[in-house]
Amino acid sequence: MDELKLSKALKLLMPLGGYSTVEGTVVINDDGIAHGYTLPSDAEIVSAILQVDAQQYKEQRAVEYPPIGDQLDAIHKGGQSHADMKVIISAVKTKYPKPNKQ
């Protein structure tokens, strides 16, 4: 199992922390017990991983988008500058599309 995805999924399920993973096995520690967490089921973990996967495109896009200041400057300037920025942003959106909702 992808440890990074598992970690992100567990953060969704237990946002206050109190858990750790050891080779893909989830362990609730004393802090987690104090927060009232119980060990999530496999189905809950799979569901959370699917949520993580569905949001991954946002992180990928954020890395490749031009800085927001440049985007705002292009809007302000208008004309060709704005058109060029729209092309750049559209290319990133095409590269990392939103997943289809099912």
Image (tube, grey):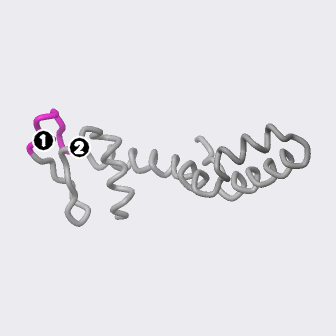
Check contact, mark 1 vs mark 2: CB within 8 A: yes
Residue type, numbered disc 2: Gly
What quarter of the picture does the C terminus occupy?
A: top right
Residue 77 horizontal/vertical position (percent): 84, 41
9 horizontally vs 23: left or right: right
Residue type, numbered disc 1: Asp
Span of residues in magenta: 30-39
Magenta stretch encompasses residue 32: yes
Q: Quadrant of residue 68?
A: top right
| Residue that numbered label 2 is attached to | 17
Residue 38 horizontal/vertical position (percent): 17, 40
| Structural crowding at the residue carrying mark 2, measured as other residues with C-alpha within 10 Å and reported as few (<14), some (14–19) or many (≥20) | some
Q: For mark 2, give the secondary structure.
A: loop
In this rendering, the count of numbered labels is: 2
Residue under the image location 11 percent in, 39 percent down? 33
| Figure check: 50 above or below 16 | below
Q: For mark 1, give the secondary structure.
A: helix
